[in-house]
Image: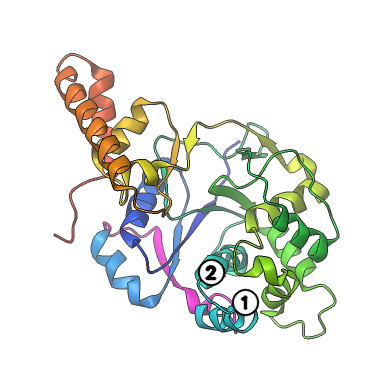
């Protein structure tokens, strides 16, 4: 069943170059109607100069998504409670992805896509019956479910994790979830749910990873709308950044395509230079062999072309 949907990705101030490949991969492989890039207004010129002009690409000021909530406000909250505000951006981007359900131009479904994640080949997000396709993962972080229980009064509903670096959202269900997150908060202001979420996280977990938008939304729909989705397996990796560094380059993208991956995340990680140098050299060697083989192999030629399309020469140079 063909469904119209939009895509949402949130980009912070660190390593925005990686997000260019993520957005380009959505343009090539996801099939959305519009892409909303939620970021600081300071980064608008970066995206305007770096990506091909496209009417389907919309830049959204992160400070205008949730009234009364900003990166600075969350940082101050964390500093007051946890003694440090380093995780402010991590929490902020989760709330932004959730709150985009209320954007006046968002469609009935929208794909949440992490800005360090690259779609390597065409992807489907609905089955033949119109149900959302979810990619199950193996992560299990107990504090997420402590928060889930406090906020919604439900336990973990499934045996897998919804944290797959992407998730198709039903706008109606997300609006319902946000209303549930408000709880009995008498303020009922647009931002009250954000502070309630942060309030229920323990002091011990607040400075680390105390809440997951993926697990919260996923378990919410599993409890209330279990027939709205089904699972499917995609070959993916969260370790592309550890192995190849970032931003993504043409040779690692080609290597991942050759390995059969559909999705790769170039997650920020400690710079393991010897490891990265080894894998980059390996990827370059494989790339060179494929270039030679492409004279006779149409498959090799197609993979090279796909990698080049995801990593074209910079428009900023």
Q: Is residue 66 in the magenta section? A: yes
Seen in the picture, residue 307 relative to 175 is either above or below; the reply is above
Q: Are marks 2 and 1 in contact (CB under 8 Å)?
A: yes
Q: Residue furthest front?
A: 274
Residue where numbered disc 2 is placed: 87
Residue 82 place in picture, x, y as percent: 62, 76
Horizontal side, residue 313 vs residue 20: left or right: left
Quickly name the residue at label 1: 82
Q: Residue at the spot x=60%, y=38% of the render?
A: 135
Residue located 54% across and 77% down the image:
84
Badge 2: few (under 14), some or many (20 or more) residues near its Cα, within 10 Å? some
SS at mark 2 in the image: loop
Q: Is residue 302 left or right of residue 143?
A: left
Q: Residue at x 76, y 81 (%)?
A: 188
Residue placed furthest toward the top: 296
Image coords of residue 168 (percent x, y) = 60, 48
Relative placement, left or right, of 68 versus 28 is: right
Magenta highlight range = 51-67
């Amino acid at each position: 069943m063909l469904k119209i949907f939009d895509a949402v990705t949130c980009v912070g101030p660190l390593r925005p170059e990686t997000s260019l490949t993520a957005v380009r991969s959505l343009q090539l492989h996801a099939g959305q109607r519009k892409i909303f890039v939620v970021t600081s207004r300071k980064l608008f010129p970066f995206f305007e100069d770096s990506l091909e002009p496209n009417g389907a690409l919309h830049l959204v000021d992160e400070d205008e998504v949730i009234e009364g909530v900003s990166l600075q406000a969350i940082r101050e909250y964390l500093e007051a409670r946890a003694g440090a505000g380093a995780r402010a951006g991590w929490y902020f981007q989760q709330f932004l992805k959730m709150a985009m359900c209320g954007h006046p131009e968002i469609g009935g479904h929208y794909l949440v896509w992490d800005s360090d994640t690259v779609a390597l080949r065409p992807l489907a997000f609905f089955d033949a019956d119109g149900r959302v396709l979810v990619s199950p993962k193996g992560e299990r972080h107990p504090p997420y479910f402590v928060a889930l229980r406090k906020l919604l009064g439900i336990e973990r509903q499934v045996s897998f994790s919804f944290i797959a670096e992407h998730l198709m959202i039903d706008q109606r269900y997300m609006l319902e979830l946000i209303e549930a997150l408000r709880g009995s908060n008498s303020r009922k202001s647009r931002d009250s749910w954000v502070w309630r979420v942060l309030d229920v996280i323990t002091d011990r977990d607040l400075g680390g990873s105390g809440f997951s938008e993926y697990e919260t939304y996923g378990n919410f729909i599993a409890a209330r709308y279990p027939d709205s989705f089904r699972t499917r397996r995609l070959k993916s990796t969260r370790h592309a950044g550890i192995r190849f560094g970032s931003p993504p380059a043409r040779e690692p993208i080609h290597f991942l395509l050759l390995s059969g991956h559909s999705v790769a995340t170039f997650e920020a990680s400690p710079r393991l230079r010897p490891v990265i140098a080894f894998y980059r050299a390996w990827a370059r060697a494989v790339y060179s062999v494929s270039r030679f083989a492409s004279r006779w192999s149409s498959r090799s030629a197609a993979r090279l072309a796909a990698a080049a399309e995801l990593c074209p020469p910079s428009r900023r140079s």
